[in-house]
Amino acid sequence: MEVRGKHALRLGIAGRQRYEGERLLRIEGYLRAPVSGVLRDAVGALIRGGDQDLVVDLSRVADVDAAGIGELARIYTMAIGAGAVLRLANPTRRVQTLLHRAGLLEILGAKPTAALERIS
């Protein structure tokens, strides 16, 4: 799934494989207001499709704004509400800083995952 524009967010789902039950979503580009809903739509579709253990890799996020941080909180809440698990992985320094300022780093903080260990 990809949205193009001046500050595009490209959302790639790493293959169709699961790694020890985890589905990996790798985000590339700018996680900002105009396109942040793309992430919500993708996560919602995966949950509706039966994925219950999601890993969102943030290592390739070039920049994020408050709307993007809000979107990360929304997808986390959406996953929990659906009985799924969602973890953030490899947040860039900018993402970590904004999550910390919003008081969300401890809640949404990155944790080791089988999916990233296998493909790293």
Image: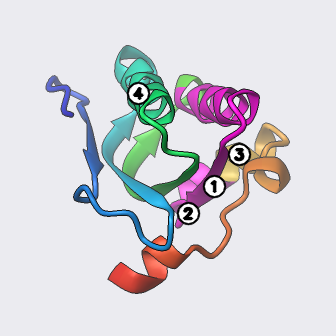
Label 1, label 4: how far apart the Cα atoms are: 17 Å
Local crowd at mark 4 within 10 Å, few (<14), some, or many (≥20)? Answer: few
Q: Which residues are magenta?
A: 68-96
Label 4: element kind: helix
Above or below: residue 112 compared with residue 98 = below
Can you tell which mark lies on residue 45?
Answer: 4
Above or below: residue 35 compared with residue 85 = above
Mark 1: amino acid: Arg
Q: Residue 120 in the image: x percent, y percent? A: 36, 84
Label 2, label 4: how far apart the Cα atoms are: 20 Å
Q: Which of the two discs, 2 and 4, labels the residue nearer the N terminus?
A: 4
Q: Is residue 80 visible?
A: yes
Q: Residue 92 in the image: x percent, y percent? A: 51, 61
Label 1: element kind: strand
Mark 2 or 4, which is nearer the eye?
Answer: 4
Residue 57 is inside the magenta segment: no
Q: Which of the two discs, 3 and 2, labels the residue nearer the N terminus?
A: 2
Q: In the rendered image, which quarter is residue 101 located in? A: top right
Mark 4: amino acid: Ala
Which residue in the structure is indicated by mark 1? 87
**Most foreground residue, 83 or 113:** 83
Which residue in the structure is indicated by mark 3? 99
Q: Which of the two discs, 3 and 1, labels the residue nearer the N terminus?
A: 1
